[in-house]
Image (spheres, coloured by chain):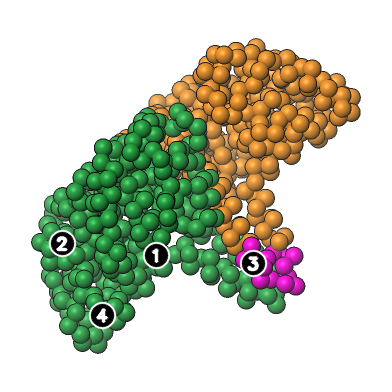
Chain colours: A green, B orange
Amino acid sequence: MRIALDVMGGDDAPQPNIDGAIAALEADSDLEIAMVGDQPLIDSLIEKSGYSGDRMQVVPAEGVVGMAEKPTIAHRKKPNNSIAVCWRLMAQKEVDGVVSAGNTGAVVAAALWSKLFLKGIKRPGIAVTLPTLRGRSILMDVGANPAARPEHLYQYGVIGSVYSRRILGVSGPSIGLMNIGSEEGKGNDLYRETHTFLSNSPLKDIYVGNVEGRGLYRGEADVLICEGFVGNIVLKVSEGMVDYLFKSVGSALMEQLDTERHIAQRVFQEVAARHQYSEAGGAPLLGIDGICIICHGSSDARSIKNALGVAKSLNDHQLNKHIVEEMQKYSL
Amino acid sequence: MRIALDVMGGDDAPQPNIDGAIAALEADSDLEIAMVGDQPLIDSLIEKSGYSGDRMQVVPAEGVVGMAEKPTIAHRKKPNNSIAVCWRLMAQKEVDGVVSAGNTGAVVAAALWSKLFLKGIKRPGIAVTLPTLRGRSILMDVGANPAARPEHLYQYGVIGSVYSRRILGVSGPSIGLMNIGSEEGKGNDLYRETHTFLSNSPLKDIYVGNVEGRGLYRGEADVLICEGFVGNIVLKVSEGMVDYLFKSVGSALMEQLDTERHIAQRVFQEVAARHQYSEAGGAPLLGIDGICIICHGSSDARSIKNALGVAKSLNDHQLNKHIVEEMQKYSL
């Protein structure tokens, strides 16, 4: 598999991207990486790293989309920026996947312009895997589609259930609609329409209905669907809360424990790891004809290595083939 | 102060409401409670409780709005239900406040029909206080107004800042807009419009801009505003996450700690208490000419007692007088 890595994307780029790419190549001999960005800079960093293999090729790009830049304006001003070049490589079938820790909006905008959608898909969405009291659930979309329509959310249900089954190994995954109450008629227009839509759709047998915010971490559905605005806020509030609770409980605990402090530290580290982006690697943008992994802006070398590994794993599992099959089965 | 208590509202009603009311009366000699609901039932429970004071009067109501019932239909079918009677007492100035652990939608619907709004207020909203790394922040609205307009959110900023200053004692509270990114132009139409609206409004000097989900528990703003759909999901996801983390970290810790297990248990209890509804009592519906505290459906006697205490405290602080003054100062 060949992946285009946006070497310039991320808060601390390019160093963690170079280090992560080398670590990924060492871990997987089937991988090749197109290193996209400022050629002289990347050449010198690769030389400095001592990497001497032939599975890394530099592909030049001009400019970077800043983390706070408006995607549309940035793409227009810098048409050959590293994110745009990555997507062009995928459109030309020169790579099978794209990995970027750059401006998420710019990655999504490039995806929309590329029109590289799987057959039948109206709008791609970002899926994240969250730990719950019952295992792991998928939340989709968390930011690619902030003004979704019911048929988009329906497709996220189909895509998410394929992901849950094929990647997380859940048999017979259930689908829930994130909402402000479990009863019929809850929510705003979009959520009421989507609930009616799903209840009468080919998904109706695995659709468990509206799921309240509390139900997410209880694992009340294997796949929770929502539009990007709500999903993004849910994801980031969750991140903030993990951080808050670990800091507040953790500092009180470490202060008051004595001989058994090391045990508490280990437990905290283990649970924290489940919530760390560096372990998860990144979140896939699904519905794309190709693979796209969006990494956290603050990605370190370990996150980038893991994100490249996630891209490889989705490819190995032929996720897209299964999504296309399921989309046909559940076509409206 | 005289408060109408919806004795029939709540998952375990009426017993916790009777017990909570008696505890509140014992704690505060300035309080009187109108016990609204099924008269013979309430009479018998009060008699059984042994309460013999004269600061509790039963006001009959017919029927209860079920927790899963649609508010509009329930109010039409049962016009003298306990929630409706509570609000009628407030409209007739026979009580200064309403406390209910019943169907939240039905309480809000009764509030909207009563038109008991403070001068200048377009739509009331529910405010909750959340602990953060820097203290406490207000999140408003968490469910009263699922289809808000920019001018509603503007008013929540004004109301929330009064609450933050007068009740939480924050001097010079800041206001943030819950959004999916901190940069200008982020979010859907409502949030983009609201950002522009606030940036050019009389609140502009204390408006700190868009705040991401992560910023909530970091305490990046003293008052965070959003429409009810998003706020409700944020609140319930947070509740679910506290529960999930305490169960997952807690069980691993208790299993592995030995001699110092009791210390960890105490720390967990202390932090958990900060997130418990029974301690907070309930969330105020603000913007109402009167006081309304909405309690969790699962309220126990302690929550009801505390909710009555919160109502008393808002009255003692003359919160509404300050809101009206501030609304005039910040009128558009």
Chain of residue at mark 1: A
Is B245 on the left or on the right of A226, as rendered?
right
**Label pair 4/1, CB-CB below 8 angstroms:** no
**Label pair 2/1, CB-CB below 8 angstroms:** no
Label 2: which residue? Answer: A90
Q: Is residue B325 visible?
A: no
Q: Check the image and report above or below for A216 versus B263.
A: above
The dot on residue B253 is 3
Three-letter amino acid code of the residue under disc 2: Met
Q: Dot 1 lies on which element?
A: helix
Distance in Å between CA atoms under marks 3 and 4: 40 Å
Q: Nearer the viewer, residue B87 or A142?
A: A142
Three-letter amino acid code of the residue under disc 1: Ala
Distance in Å between CA atoms under marks 3 and 2: 47 Å
Q: Check the image and report above or below for B242 versus B7.
A: below
Whole-percent x, y for residue B223 in the image: 50, 42
Label 4: which residue? Answer: A29
